[in-house]
Image: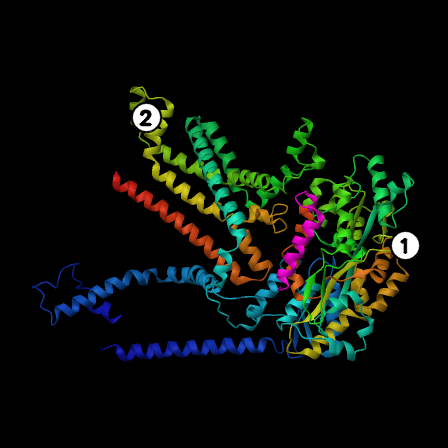
Amino acid sequence: MPHAPGRRLLAGAAALSLGLLTAACGGDASSSSGDGSGAGPTLDVWIMEGTNPDAGPYFEELAAVFEEKTGALLNVQFIQWADAHDRITTAMAGRELPDVAEIGTTWALEFGAVGALRDLSGDIEAAGLAGDLVPALHEAGTVDGATYGMPWHAGTRSLMYRADLFAEHGLQPPTSWDELLDVALQLKELEPDMIPFPVIGGTEYAVDAFIWGGGGQIAQADDSGRWTSTINAPEAVAGIEFLTSLATEHGLSVAAAETWTEADQLQSFQNGEAAMVINGNWTVNTLLADDPSWADRLGVVPVPGPQPGTYSPSFVGGSLLGDFTSDHPELAWELIQLMSTGEYGAKWADESGFFPGQQSLLEDVAAEAGPLVAPFATQMMEAGHSVPVTELYGRVQGAQIIPRMLQSILAGSASVQEAADTAAAAMDETFGH
Amino acid sequence: MATDRATGPTRPRPGREAGPDRPAPDPARRARRARRARALRPWLLLAPALTVLAVLLLWPLLRVVLLSFQDYGLRQIYTGETHWTGLDNYTTLLTDSALWTTVLPNTVVFAAVCVALTVITGTLVALLLQRLGRTWRIICSTVVMTAWAMPAVTGTYVWIWIFDPLGGIVSGGLDALGLIEPRETNWFTDRWSFYAIATLNVVHHGFPFVAITVFAGLLTIPRELPEAALMDGANAWQRFWKITVPTIRPVFTVVTILSTIWDFKVFAQIYLMPGGSGSNPDIFNLGVWSYHQSFVKNEYGMGSAIAVLLTVLLLAITVVYLRALFKERDDL
């Protein structure tokens, strides 16, 4: 074996260089989350793309202010709503989570429950903000006293109608369930080619409003924090019954709407087919951007309640800012506070067409809002609601239990009570009964 | 590389000990070493490809199998802890009545129908191509290729538009004939009509591959065979079944196996249709169900178990096919 010593040397050198390489990688990885430019730490921030059509300038300004204030830099990445949940999950597995991220309201509890989000309630309390957050949004991120997401911007759904048609036929926008039925029946006669009020089966938020309007609840927790579905209780069933009867008994919808999502429904409204729809405040901007003449054709009122003068509470959605257990919790909170309150909170809401998540800012907006914004603000402040505040409700939504219920009623394969019983059983199974 | 260097130039031929004309100190040992080197060499050459395959295919496959024996959710992803539950996922899965009444029938019947229709349509188109002149053959095969080249997602949306209850061309046509009332029609809510549309979509997307492959097979049949049969008075039907099919049977076997595999694991074509993403549990197939359990309900263990079941089912079908194929060879 004449070559043996040489080979051993070679192998040794290879092992050594491999070791150096891994050491170098390790060193690199550990320093990257530390200081980027030598000035201060860099915070990774994930923001959903599209909420604000032109978010670049906002974040440039924010980064400059933040650096001046704290010396820290921001690394903002825009991600898509559609794959954001998967992306955060993947980042959790790969330990590549951002410091601060925008999250959907139902995700806060889900990610909070596994320990991926830091409880912000202490910081919110210390900053004196606890009483100044939009209640439904604050509640949505809070469980057992821990708040996993800071309200950033909010939105809600109300009844949007064709003001031009209503004026032409001398109709008044409905203020109660009876009036809603009545005006829809009149529209059916007056505009036979239109869809008076599409009852859609692809999303739960419209029927949620009628469930709450009828005095029902989707689910309720007992003292021990155990959730039970009450969607098959008489009050909830009354709401479901009223909404679905518009389609099944009165023929005010079309069969195609059984599988429509809110986007399909908006499309139908935009095309001049639907006369009344329940949709979100952010869609007003979509309509106006498409055709400015919508300003004269669109009317908005809060979702009517069962009696005249009452409202059916509507789901307050939007997004929260969460701290994914950043290495720099003080900086993360500093940033969250900067983005969600005061000047930059108001600016973001204004640019994105949503409402601010800070109650005092919301009141300012509501006070000077135009006719296409004010009804949504009223809805949010006087008749806003959150879905059951448990991480398990995210799974109920994922499994599309309520759309399933709606579709079976609308397609005629189950009665309202049967479908509600099935939905309640499916929810209870998810709640761990 | 010491072994190579030592044995390289004087490598003995396979099955032979070192020759008597070359005196070696220990011929048996040298031969053993040579054999080992020869056995090792192909693996050495295959190593790069195998490493890539192992990293990209085998490891994920193994992970899915391992996950299927665990309770794996968001908590496990975040903390990295492992919670083995043995066969629990499989017991839950196999005792779930939805599997037997909805998911499995949807998967198996849909795949069987699609494979049959795909192979029949593809063969008919291949026979047509064979009879056409040069110009029409080019035109037809180009048109056929277009259907094949369309991505599944795009194709699915086109079929959704075609069958859109309010503005689609089909409901428009049937409405003009007075057969349906578009405002009261929704084909996407009913299990049968939903799958009928999905079948059209999958067959339309799948038949060009069969057509082109079978057409290539047809070109290999010696011209004398059908001519002789024609002389013997065989009609077209007899010539197809007695000459064409037996001659290119392996081609049919291959396209059937491949179509079966593709049609069993159809996902996008179902998931993207209205009601296909979970709001209508009647239309779940194994692929959509697995996705739903994993990524919607965050029960990755259960989702993996469904994926393993789908894989096992596919393997079983493929083995049966391959055995049939080899048995035929032996019989010939």
Look at the image and say whether residue B26 sits in the magenta stretch: no
Q: Chain of mark 1?
A: A
* Residue B306 can be seen, yes or no: no
Secondary structure state at the residue bearing disc 1: loop
* Quadrant where the N terminus of chain B is found in the figure: bottom left
* Quadrant where the C terminus of chain B is found in the figure: top left
In the rendered view, does B269 fall on the left or right side of A49?
left
* Residue A385 can be seen, yes or no: yes
Label drawn at residue A309: 1
Look at the image and say whether residue A430 sits in the magenta stretch: yes
Q: Nearer the viewer, residue A181 or B160?
A: A181
Q: Nearer the viewer, residue B105 or A433?
A: A433
- Residue in view at x 86 percent, y 50 percent: A176
- Position of residue A143 measured from the top left corner of the image (x, y, whole percent): 71, 71
Range shown magenta: A409-433
Q: Chain of mark 2?
A: B
- Farthest residue toward the right? A170
Residue placed under numbered mark 2 in the picture: B226
* Residue B135 vertical placement versus A71 (above, below): above
Q: CA distance from mark 1 to mark 2?
A: 85 Å
Neighbours of disc 2 within 10 Å: few (<14), some (14-19), many (20+)? some
Q: Nearer the viewer, residue B221 or A3?
A: B221
In the rendered view, does B146 fall on the left or right side of B158?
left
Q: How many marks?
A: 2
Colour option used: rainbow
Asked if labels 2 and 1 touch by Cβ distance under 8 angstroms, the answer is no
Q: Quadrant of residue A274?
A: top right
